Image (tube, rainbow, N blue to C red):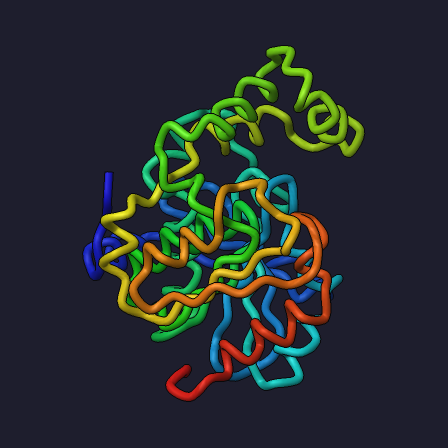
Amino acid sequence: MVFLGLAILGFLQSGTAQSGRAGSGGHYFTSFDGTRIYYETEGKGPAVVLIHGFMGTGAVWKKIALFRDLRQAGFQLIIPDLRGNGQSDKPHDASAYLHDAEARDLMGILNRMGIHHYLVVGYSRGSIIAARLMVLDPRVTRVVLGGMGTGFTDPQWPRRKLFYRALMGDSIASLASMVRSVQQQGLDQRALALQQFGQPSTSPGELAAVHRPVLVICGDQDQDNGSGQALAAMIPKAQFRTVPGDHPGAMHSAAFSTIVAAFLEAPGAP
């Protein structure tokens, strides 16, 4: 089910903002279905939404150079915990993760903040949600898709289905360590499974219709999610860059920050 342009923006006006934890810089937004989404903001200036990956939270961004560099460059950073993660609500109903729910949460937050134009940086699964924003929301001006290849363009992506099965209890040897990590960290295993169940795909046709600048950036040892170069080739104004590292490591490299910050600050960016 696809929601387009102003229609979805009007629909999301039904969300409400609530105060976050005292002293944390955090806020809660009650989204279209009553799910509370936690987010933090830092700085003033052009808005950049930072979208974390699977099993993560917005706090991961504060551990890498890009966070410091963007803040010093004069951007306003908007850092959510996607539904099912961190301090956001974790619905156990599969329907809560369907129909672009995560992108709609973020669009609702931006509506409430009165943001008219914004940039997006996603990493890993966060790039999948970033891709939905660039398709659904005309306010998006530039997008960074980090740690992502063509895998998510397939609605029947085998990797997604394996993650779902493993998290729902099937014995899959190649993902046993991932499931153990979820359990050892005390993460909500069912919510994570349902994120995989409802994870959106973005078709090559949708990507071909995007005419905004896009940066696809991956580690030179990262093939976890398919070819980043092939993904960039699907998007008319996309460029592809590599930095040293594997999938979890690439975003921590100094080169990642340098390249992403330069892309966001390029002439024509808000």
| Residue 42: quadrant of the picture | bottom right
**Residue depicted at x 48% and y 64%:** 240
Tell which residue pokes out farthest to the bottom in this image: 267
**Residue depicted at x 69% and y 49%:** 246
Quarter of the rendering occupied by the C terminus: bottom left
- Residue placed most toward the observer, 21 or 56: 56
Quarter of the rendering occupied by the N terminus: top left
Number of labels in the image equals 0
Residue 29 in percent (x, y) is at 49, 54
Q: Is residue 149 above or below residue 72?
A: above
Residue 108 in percent (x, y) is at 38, 57
Q: Is residue 213 above or below residue 52?
A: below
Asked if residue 117 lies left or right of residue 241, the reply is left
- Residue placed most toward the observer, 199 or 251: 251
**Residue depicted at x 43% and y 25%:** 94
Task: Examine the rendering and report whether any part of residue 114 can be seen.
Answer: no
Residue 147 in percent (x, y) is at 56, 52
Asked if residue 139 lies left or right of residue 253, the reply is left
Residue 126 in percent (x, y) is at 52, 50
Task: Examine the rendering and report whether any part of residue 245 can be seen.
Answer: yes
**Residue depicted at x 40% and y 58%:** 232
Q: Is residue 265 above or below residue 60?
A: below
Tell which residue pokes out farthest to the right in this image: 184
